[in-house]
Amino acid sequence: MAESSNLKELGEALHSRLIAGDKLASAELSETFFPILSKAVERRFHNLPDPHLVTVAAEEGFLRYLQQPDKFDPQKSSLIAYLYLAAWRNVIDKLRASTETFVELDSTKTEHIVDEGAYNPELKLIEEEAAQFAPTSPAMQRMFAVVTDPVDRKLVRLMMDGVRDTREYAEVMGIQDLSFDDQQAKVKQHKDRIKTALRRNLKDWEPK
Amino acid sequence: MQSEATDSGLLARLVQRLANDTTYMAHVFALYKSQEGFDDADLATYLNAFPEQIIRLALCKRPEPDAPDFADQIRLLGDFTLIDEALLAHVIRQVDSLTHLSQSPMLADPAPNTVLGFKPFEGTLAAARDRDEIPKDSGDTEGSNEKKEK
């Protein structure tokens, strides 16, 4: 996942890649945006009798985006705002369809949220909160707990960011002066070595 | 900062829901687990990967088997998740082969020969493995060797 504190730009970049058919984009979008979205929606509807309804609504909203990404227009809103509104509407629809009442919902806030064109303090807050950290995927965190060598960590970061350019790896490894073919061979060798080391480490790992 | 365990749990739920979408690796893994009688832990062990790596891979779109750059796509997924490319390719090919075979007219409507005690699909599965796949315990791949040493 690309390291970025600007969630709006990151969302636009990943969205463009998803539209272009990038095989990795859905995973990066999920790792970056789904936990933020899910927790924001759960916070908003924390007092509903059935918390599962909120979880499912967030999942369905996010999956709908993955299936129909072209419905999101980056010119109109940030991706996190779009996803939040979709999940929010999903919750409301589910509540309307169920026998639950709206007693616990604040209707004045509802009016704010459904008005996409208006300045929305709740969405602003979510975006600000989300931007306070550079999201790191659980997979990346796991790898960084295992790989401790600084150079290997940089290589792992490039690999897990989907970087394909050999020159970027060569630069990290300090082998820019080699011929391109030699760089490719060395880079491949290092990648394989890292994967082998991870497998060895896995043997000592016990699931929690 | 969000907790790792919570994020993994959330993402694992997404993976479950994507298992029905044929364009995702989550679907490939669901079929492979069904074919092999694996659970999540078995799959992780087979792929020599931490659960977080499996989840990340499952959230990726699957490579198209007929794509001219299939090998490149496998390599990209292997790097992205740090999972062995040969094992990954094996999983995808097995799932595609068996899915294709199970859709063939002969297997979809098998002849009434069960008196011989054969299950038609089992024989086909064995033949497919003999010809073009890596047996799990053969030690033919680096990944398999690693597992064998356990």
Image (tube, coloured by chain):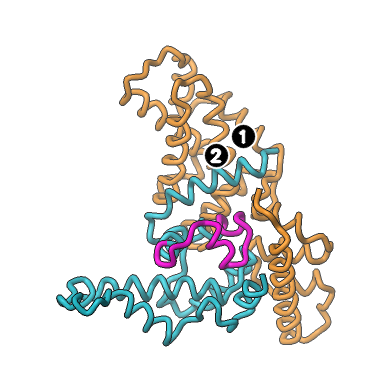
Chain colours: A orange, B cyan
- The residue indicated by pointer 2 is A80
- The answer to if B129 sits in the magenta stretch is no
Q: Residue at x 42, y 48 (%)?
A: B17
Q: What residue type is labelled 2?
A: Ile
Quadrant in the picture for the N terminus of chain A: bottom right
Q: Mark 1 points at which residue?
A: A127
B47 part of magenta stretch: yes
Which mark, by number, is residue A168? none
Q: Nearer the viewer, residue A165 or A58?
A: A58
Compared with B125, A39 (above or below) is: above
What residue lies at 53% left-to-right and 24% top-to-bottom?
Answer: A44
Residue A199 visible, this angle: yes
The rendered magenta stretch, by its main secondary structure, is classed as: helix
Instruction: Name the residue: 21% across, 71% down.
Output: B108
Above/below status of B137 relative to A27:
below
Image vertical order of residue A166 relative to residue A37, above or below:
below
Q: Residue A184 appears in which quarter of the rendering?
A: bottom right
Horizontal and vertical percent for residue A156?
A: 72, 64
Task: Say which residue appears at 81% left-offset and 78% top-offset.
Answer: A176
Where residue B28 appears, x then y in whole percent? 43, 64
For the record, the magenta segment spans: B34-56
